[in-house]
Amino acid sequence: MDVDPSPDPVVAGHLQELRRGTVVLAALVALRTPGYGYALLESLNEHGIGVDANTLYPLLRRLEKQGLLTSEWNTDESRPRKFYRTSDEGDDLAATLIADWHRLDASLRHLTEETP
Amino acid sequence: MSTLTDRYVHAATRFVSAEDERTELALELRERIADTIDDLRARGLAEEQAEWQALSDLGDPLRLAAEYRGRPMQLIGPRYYFIWLRLLVTLLAIVPAAIGVIAALAAAGAREPAGDIIGTGISAALSVALQVAFWTTAVFAFIERAAPDGTEETAWSPEKLPELPDASERHRRNDLVASLVFITTMAALLVWQYVGSPFFDGETRLPILAPDLWPWRGGALLALLALEAGQALWLYRRGWTWPGAIANIAISLAFGGLLVWLFLTDRLLNPAFIEHVGWDQSWVDSATPFVVVATVAIVAWESIDALLKAGRRGRAVSS
């Protein structure tokens, strides 16, 4: 599932560190349309945001606890599923995170241009 | 739902005390397990294999529940670790030694033999050390779980920094001179009271200490004093190392132990001398507990001092 699988554990560890915050951002953006755990897991991985189920499920709970997501049990289908949706606070946080992401991107580009 | 999934959900939720939370967690886990099984079956796995695989991927149910609920998975986390460590070390340095001395004092007051007094002191110190370690840790483990998320460690400020260890040459030379003067004086007194005692019974010189100390027991005392002098020189040259501290403690224990044993078995003082100066044997007996306790206290203090100095130096060198 990893976008850039690397056999070196040091490299893998740093990549994981770099991507950790992006999962939160991706989930907040994706859940503007309500969705449940497994569907979100698949759609994130399809979009190249590599994330593990053992990371994503506890993360959704934490974001809900922080008021960034709201949840509702959907019992229409044969199996009850918990649907999450990004709250207004979550939307605000996503906007802040995206702005910071662009700022970091610009900063890093400056840095790499200055130090070839 | 098969029994394996039921068992997994039960294992993950059985320690959640709040009814609502337990029901919710169980529903979420069932949803996740069922979705995972569906996906694995779509990839061609048989029902049973898919369930087995899904549950294997979830891992230890207790760990999973802790991750879902944001519960700590360590006894004492980084928030409280150093407060716990400092408190524990401080308490262990003071409390067991103090209780050990008090227990030895009580045993000495009850006129128990020397071995029993020392044994009582040591076993009291050990059991107190265990109690201190257990309860301190238990209280901190509780705080770790009871303190709300986001509680910061108590603020640290630069004034809490320890003083630099004083390992200056001058300081160590003073220590050496003091030790050598003390040791030489003790050795001289030990020999003088035998060969040059100012007390006479008629024409016979009366040693203050029992004459049958010589050659063996008195010799042992002199040998220990010589060892202590060598040890003081070693410390002067090498500073307080761990082997130095251990040797120091061993010599102190041997010297103190020998003295206490001689005193308690009435082998230390010369009975003829006691009679000559008109002391009553019962005075000597009633002084016994105090002599024993004072000796134990001095040995304990020396040992703790040696360990502290070695520990301080160890940190100064490694930092």
Image: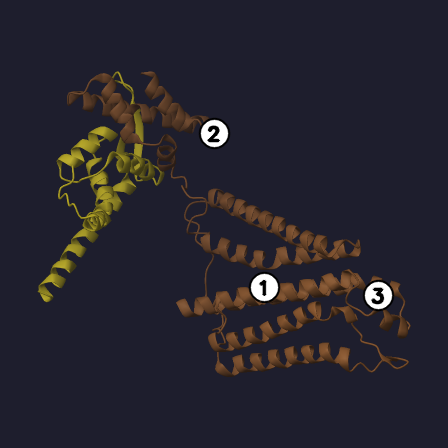
Taking depth in this image into account, of B287 and B73 the one nearest to the observer is B287
Q: Which element carries disc 1, helix, strand or loop? A: helix
Residue B198, compared with residue B60, is above or below; it is: below
Q: Residue at 72% across / 63% down in the picture? A: B260
Among the chains, which one is yellow? A
Q: Looking at the rendered structure, which numbered label has been put on residue B133?
A: none
Residue B319 is at least partly visible in this image: no
- Direction from residue B105 to residue B233 in the image, left or right: left
Where residue B150 sits in the image (x, y, percent)?
41, 48
Q: Amino acid at mark 2?
A: Ser
Question: Which class describes the residues within 10 Å of circle 2: few (<14), some (14-19), or many (20+)?
Answer: few
Where residue B288 sits in the image (x, y, percent)?
79, 62
Residue B199 is at least partly visible in this image: yes
Where residue A49 sits in the image (x, y, percent)?
17, 40
Q: Residue at 76% across / 80% down in the picture? A: B195
Counting residues from the N terminus, which is met first, the one under dot 2 or under dot 3? Answer: 2
- Structural distance between the alpha carbons of marks 1 and 3: 28 Å
Taking depth in this image into account, of B279 and B8 the one nearest to the observer is B279
Q: Which residue is mark 2?
A: B17
- Number of labels in the image equals 3
Quarter of the image where the C terminus of chain A is located:
bottom left
Q: Amino acid at mark 1?
A: Ala
Q: Which element carries disc 3, helix, strand or loop? A: helix
Do marks 2 and 1 share a chain? yes
Quarter of the image where the N terminus of chain A is located:
top left
Q: Which residue is mark 3?
A: B284
Counting residues from the N terminus, which is met first, the one under dot 1 or under dot 3? Answer: 1
Q: Residue at 66% across / 69% down in the picture? A: B220
Q: Which residue is mark 1?
A: B250
Q: Amino acid at mark 3?
A: Val
Chain B as rendered: colour? brown
Question: Which class describes the residues within 10 Å of circle 1: few (<14), some (14-19), or many (20+)?
Answer: some
